[in-house]
Image (spheres, rainbow, N blue to C red):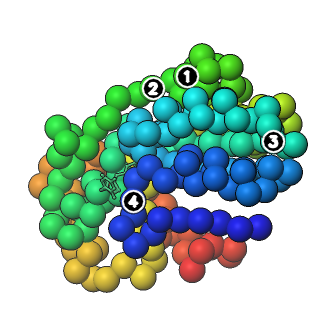
Amino acid sequence: MRGSLSGTLATMGPGVPYLIGAKFAYPDRPGIALVGDGAMQMNGMAELITAAKYYPEWSDPRLVVAVLNNHDLNQVTWEMRAMQGAPQFEDSQAIPDVRYADVAALFGLGGVRVERPEDVAPAWRQALAADRPFVIDFRTDPAVPPIPPHATWDQIKASASSVLHGDSDRGDVVRQGLKAKLQDFLPGGAG
Ligand SMILES: Cc1ncc(C[n+]2csc(CCOP(=O)(O)OP(=O)(O)O)c2C)c(N)n1
Ligand SMILES: [Mg+2]
């Protein structure tokens, strides 16, 4: 299995185009893109038109786009919390909900919206059984910290300070942060 990532600059937008490129290189294999909702709004939705145009040429038509729909430019929200102790600045960070599965349907593709944990596995099964490109719209929680377990003391201190400075998500941030820390100590946890 091969993965590609525009990692050094965390570039938004390559996910769906990279996947379309991968499908031209390996038209006989299924391909999956994991994309943020901000990136999906930036160019991913338009690239679905490209996928719709070319998939009939691929021997395996499976191209799955999984959108992590947290209504937020979340990596930067967390960067501001961890580096500057700044509470979420909604005017620049919040982005609107879009029904990505409905957009896929508009282009003649498959799609489903997932709002409950028990619907995650069935959605993947549906996407991987589809006879055409498929979009899974996962509603996700912007309060789950993407910070790895080896966060530095300064980053932890700055994140805590953003909560004290009135972050609009502060209750959820504290709850999700504690949950992640507890999982470190449980058998099978990430720790
Ligand atoms: C083209 C581009 N524009 C802006 C940025 C700065 N940036 C990095 S991550 C990010 C937010 C990404 O939001 P989203 O796609 O919704 O993913 P999330 O972090 O919420 O999972 C931004 C604005 C970037 N890396 N690349
Ligand atoms: Mg997002």
Q: In this rendering, which labeled residue sits more in front, label 3 or label 1?
A: 3
Please name whichever residue, 172 or 138, is drawn nearer the observer in this view of the structure: 138
Could you give the CA–CA distance between mark 4 and mark 3, rounded to whole angstroms?
27 Å
Marker disc for residue 11: 4
Q: Earlier in the sequence, mark 3 or mark 1?
A: 3
Where residue 150 appears, x then y in whole percent?
A: 42, 82
State the SS at label 3.
loop
Location of mark 2 (residue): 98
Where residue 162 appears, x then y in whole percent?
A: 18, 59
Is the C terminus in the top left, top right, bottom left or bottom right quadrant? bottom right
Whether the residues at callouts 2 and 3 have beta carbons within 8 Å, the answer is: no
Whether the residues at callouts 4 and 3 have beta carbons within 8 Å, the answer is: no
Location of mark 3 (residue): 58
State the SS at label 2.
loop
> What amino acid type is highlighted by mark number 1?
Val
Residue lying at 65% horizontally and 66% vertically, measured from the top left? 3
The image shows residue 30, relative to residue 41, as above or below, that is below
Could you give the CA–CA distance between mark 2 and mark 1, rounded to whole angstroms?
8 Å
Location of mark 1 (residue): 103
Rendering quarter of residue 118: top right
The image shows residue 35, relative to residue 1, as above or below, that is above
Residue lying at 68% horizontally and 55% vertically, measured from the top left? 22
Q: Residue furthest left?
A: 165
Please name whichever residue, 65 or 78, is drawn nearer the observer in this view of the structure: 65
Disc 3 residue: CB within 8 Å of ligand 1: no
Disc 4 residue: CB within 8 Å of ligand 1: yes
Q: Earlier in the sequence, mark 2 or mark 1?
A: 2
Q: Earlier in the sequence, mark 2 or mark 4?
A: 4
Residues packed near mark 2 inside 10 Å, few (<14), some (14 to 19) or many (20 plus) = some
